[in-house]
């Protein structure tokens, strides 16, 4: 199994290949440079692994939530690469990838939070399901930081840019169930690839035309006057 993954959903731009055991990856914090960086990154990880795109089994991408422009870039590039190589796609939640990256040291519950601007956050609670698998508790939402909902039956850690912006508010809501926070963390293609590997093994792949972004904020793409 060889998964090519990419992500451009936030300030970070990344690409990775996961072969079931190890990652080859590139990662760079480069706001507004994703269009220039993502294709060279893909070429670099393929070259480092000695692979051609046709040797991949699927193309995974960070399908959002995140920056409106960023998730569109990721979906568009993934779709184009997958069409060109006749590969299926695997959309992966950026919040799920953030959560998997933060898990470890006996902590299996993560409060993933990305700054959504406009005084809101993208929020989800994930729990470890397997080595590379995570399961969503409740739903992924966009909401004010004071309105986040979390399970009352376990302790967890907070991860993501939303914690950097709204640490005081979020910590106040969650209280003593918050073990620690990792605020300076963004989605990374190497963890998107690992989550995608579980989907691939379970047969949860899609044709390239279904490489679509997920915004959560329903009105993000609406024009004035639309409902």
Image (cartoon, grey):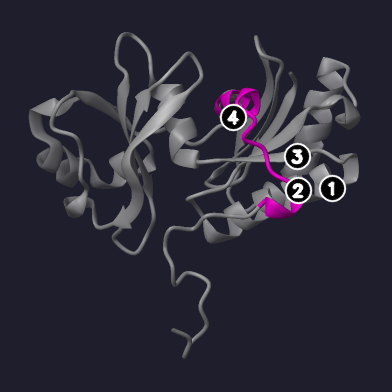
Circles 1 and 2: CB atoms closer than 8 Å: yes
Which badge, 4 or 1, is on the more N-terminal residue? 1
- SS for tag 4? helix
Direction from residue 124 to residue 52 in the image, left or right: right
Q: Which residues are magenta?
A: 195-211
- Residue wearing tag 2: 208
Q: Estimate the x, y position of residue 102 in percent, counting from the top left.
A: 40, 23
* Mark 2 residue crowding within 10 angstroms, few (<14) / some (14–19) / many (20+): many
Q: Estimate the x, y position of residue 121 in percent, counting from the top left.
A: 33, 52
- Residue lying furthest bottom: 225
- Residue wearing tag 1: 83
From the image, state whether disc 4 or disc 1 is nearer to you.
4
Which badge, 3 or 2, is on the more N-terminal residue? 3
Circles 3 and 2: CB atoms closer than 8 Å: yes
Residue at 58 percent across and 55 percent down: it is 213
Tell me the quadrant of the picture where the N terminus can be found: top right
- Residue wearing tag 3: 88
């Amino acid at each position: 199994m060889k998964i090519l993954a990419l992500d451009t959903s936030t300030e970070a731009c990344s690409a990775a290949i996961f072969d079931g055991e190890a990652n080859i990856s590139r990662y760079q914090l480069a706001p507004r440079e994703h269009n220039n960086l993502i294709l060279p990154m893909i070429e670099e990880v393929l070259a480092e692994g000695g692979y051609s795109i046709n040797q991949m089994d699927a193309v995974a991408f960070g399908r959002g939530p995140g920056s409106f422009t960023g998730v569109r870039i990721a979906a568009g590039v993934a779709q184009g690469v997958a069409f060109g190589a006749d590969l299926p796609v695997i959309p992966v939640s950026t919040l799920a990838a953030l959560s998997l990256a933060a898990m470890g040291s006996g902590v299996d519950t993560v409060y993933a939070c990305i700054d959504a601007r406009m005084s809101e956050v993208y929020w989800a609670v994930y729990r470890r399901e397997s080595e590379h698998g995570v399961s969503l508790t409740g739903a992924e939402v966009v909401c004010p930081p004071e309105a986040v909902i979390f399970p009352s039956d376990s302790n967890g850690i907070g991860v993501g840019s939303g914690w950097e912006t709204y640490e005081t508010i979020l910590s106040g809501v969650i209280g003593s169930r918050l073990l620690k926070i990792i605020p300076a963390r963004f989605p990374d293609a190497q963890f998107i690839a690992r989550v995608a590997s579980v989907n691939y093994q379970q047969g949860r792949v899609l044709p390239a035309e279904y490489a679509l972004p997920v915004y959560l904020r329903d009105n993000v793409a609406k024009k004035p006057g639309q409902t």
